Amino acid sequence: MRIRLGYELTYSFAAPTPMIVLLNVHYSRVAGLESPDHILPNPPVPIEGYRDSFGNWCSRLVAPAGLFSLTTDSVIRDDGQPDPIVTNAIQHRVEDLPTDALLFLLGSRYCETDVLADEAWRLFGATPPGWARVQAICDFVHNHIVFGYEHSRPTRTAVEAYTERRGVCRDYAHLAVTFCRCMNIPARYCTGYISDIGTPPPYSAGDFAAWMEVYLGGRWHVFDPRNNARRIGRVLIAQGRDAADVPLTHTFGPNTLTGFRVWTDEIPG
């Protein structure tokens, strides 16, 4: 399957403002791109790229005063299969985990494992360890939080999402990540494109999305507590401990987002 993906983000700046953006397809999916997903700034400005401590590709630039946009439009090849399910994937003992997975057991900016640990064990301590336990967490989070863009708040943590019971996809991901870590399952926050391919209409406007990956059975697996369903055409952009590590755009000054379009569309034939 071939999928056209891209975005157009438009801002209004009162003064020249530095930015860091994570908008390129993750290196694990770059081989599927039919053309590079270069970030195209308008008006043109220099862009410097670098890799962060998680291996994500980041770009830094200085946005000029006035209207400023970032755009890309590319095509990626995808196997066309839904997210895989591996129900026999085991939960590892902490002492058996690889060293690089241990970071994803710890609390982080939006994932307060110390506050939710007792509640996590109360809710999920009786569930079978492994895939079934993670799915039970996703089922709970999916049903516990009411989705709505009007509920979006960039400072909401997992504890606040749990108590307020409302939010957007990043809140679902933060709460599920936190519960998994409390249950000694490494979990990392992911952001990227999710398509509506294979789902019935009507379709909502395109957007970036957040989900999580958990370490079971010797590898990382995708779970999506917001949709709680297998999706076709999921394309990773970045992964980290939580949204503080992988904001799609980070601006070092005041601005107004005046335009936002994201597309992930199957190309017929």
Image (spheres, rainbow, N blue to C red):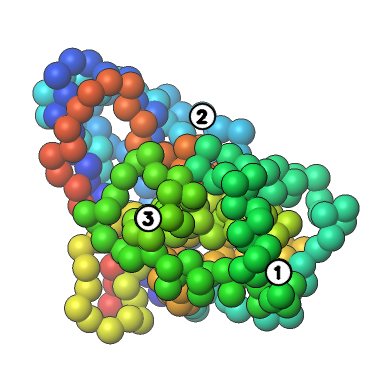
Q: Quadrant of the C terminus?
A: bottom left
Residue 163 visible in rendering:
yes
Whether 253 is drawn above or below 6: the answer is above
Please state which of residues 56 and 168 is positioned toward the viewer in this rendering: 168
Marks 3, 2: nearer the viewer: 3
Q: Nearer the viewer, residue 98 or 62?
A: 98
Give the residue drawn at x 60%, y 78%. 85
Asked whether the beta carbons under mark 1 and mark 3 sit within 8 Å of each other, the answer is no
Tag 1: residue type?
Gly
**Residue at 59% from the left image edge and 46% from the top image edge:** 115
* Left or right side of 13 for 76: right
Neighbour class for label 3 at 10 Å: few (<14), some, many (≥20)? some
Q: CA distance from mark 1 to mark 2?
A: 41 Å
User: Is residue 225 rendered to the left or right of residue 198?
Assistant: right
Q: Residues within 10 Å of mark 2 (few under 14, many from 20)?
A: few
> The residue tagged with tag 3: helix, strand or loop?
helix
In the rendered structure, which disc, 1 or 2, sits on the residue that comes first in sequence? 2
Q: Nearer the viewer, residue 85 or 27?
A: 85
* Residue at numbered disc 1: 125
Q: Left of 238 or right of it: where is 21?
A: left
Q: What percent of the width, then of the height, locates residue 111?
A: 55, 46
**Please, which residue is most extreme toward the right here?**
95
Query: Label 2 belongs to which residue?
Result: 50
Q: Tell me where residue 237 appears, x and y as whole percent.
A: 46, 50
Task: Point out the tag, 1 or 3, that comes first from the N-terminus.
Answer: 1
Residue at numbered disc 3: 164
Q: Residue at x 68, y 63 (%)?
A: 121
